[in-house]
Image (cartoon, rainbow, N blue to C red):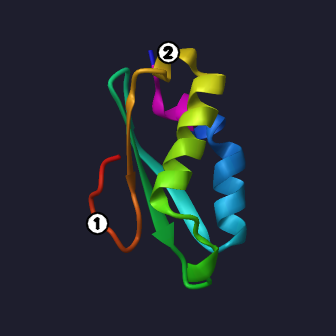
């Protein structure tokens, strides 16, 4: 079973990297079928520093499957600050 706390722990390195560029990664939902995350810009956000959504989705998927094999088939819904709800 995939839980939010497990996803947060698996994505901690990504969360830390994003924070250094002024973004927050917030896990909003997680189960065996979907992991939902929001990327939120802070007042100090570096817009040029944020990688394309497809790239970050790939990084998130890699980190999740590495730490949580049960998440392998989960859909990743990653919402960017400028795109609104954009499942990938």
Which quadrant would residue 31 be assigned to in this image?
top left
First in residue order: circle 1 vs circle 2: 2
Structural crowding at the residue carrying mark 2, measured as other residues with C-alpha within 10 Å and reported as few (<14), some (14–19) or many (≥20): some
- Residue 5 magenta-highlighted: yes
Question: Secondary structure beneath disc 2?
Answer: helix
Q: Residue at x 47, y 34 (%)?
A: 4
Q: Across the whole image, how many numbered discs are drawn on residues?
A: 2
Q: From the viewer's perspective, is residue 14 above or below residue 34?
A: below
Q: CA distance from mark 1 to mark 2?
A: 27 Å
Q: Which residues are magenta?
A: 2-7
Q: From the viewer's perspective, is residue 56 above or below residue 66?
A: below
Lateral position of residue 84 relative to residue 70, left or right: left
Numbered circle sitting on residue 70: 2
Numbered circle sitting on residue 84: 1
Question: Secondary structure beneath disc 1?
Answer: loop
Q: From the viewer's perspective, is residue 81 above or below residue 14?
A: below
Residue 46 visible in image: no
State the predominant SS element of the stretch in magenta.
helix
Which quadrant would residue 1 be assigned to in this image?
top left
Instruction: Please tell me which residue lies in front, 23 or 50.
Output: 50
Q: Residue 87 appears at what percent x and percent y?
A: 30, 48
Numbered circle sitting on residue 26: none
Looking at the image, which residue sits at the far bottom?
43
Q: Residue at x 71, y 59 (%)?
A: 17
- Residue 33 magenta-highlighted: no
């Amino acid at each position: 079973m995939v839980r939010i706390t497990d996803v947060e722990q698996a994505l901690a390195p990504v969360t830390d990297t994003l924070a250094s560029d002024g973004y927050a990664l917030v896990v909003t939902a997680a189960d065996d079928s979907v992991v939902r995350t929001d990327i939120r810009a802070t007042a100090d956000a570096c817009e040029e520093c944020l990688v394309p959504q497809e790239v970050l989705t790939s990084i998130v998927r890699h980190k999740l499957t590495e730490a949580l094999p049960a998440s392998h088939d989960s859909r990743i819904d990653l919402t960017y600050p400028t795109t609104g709800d954009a499942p990938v």
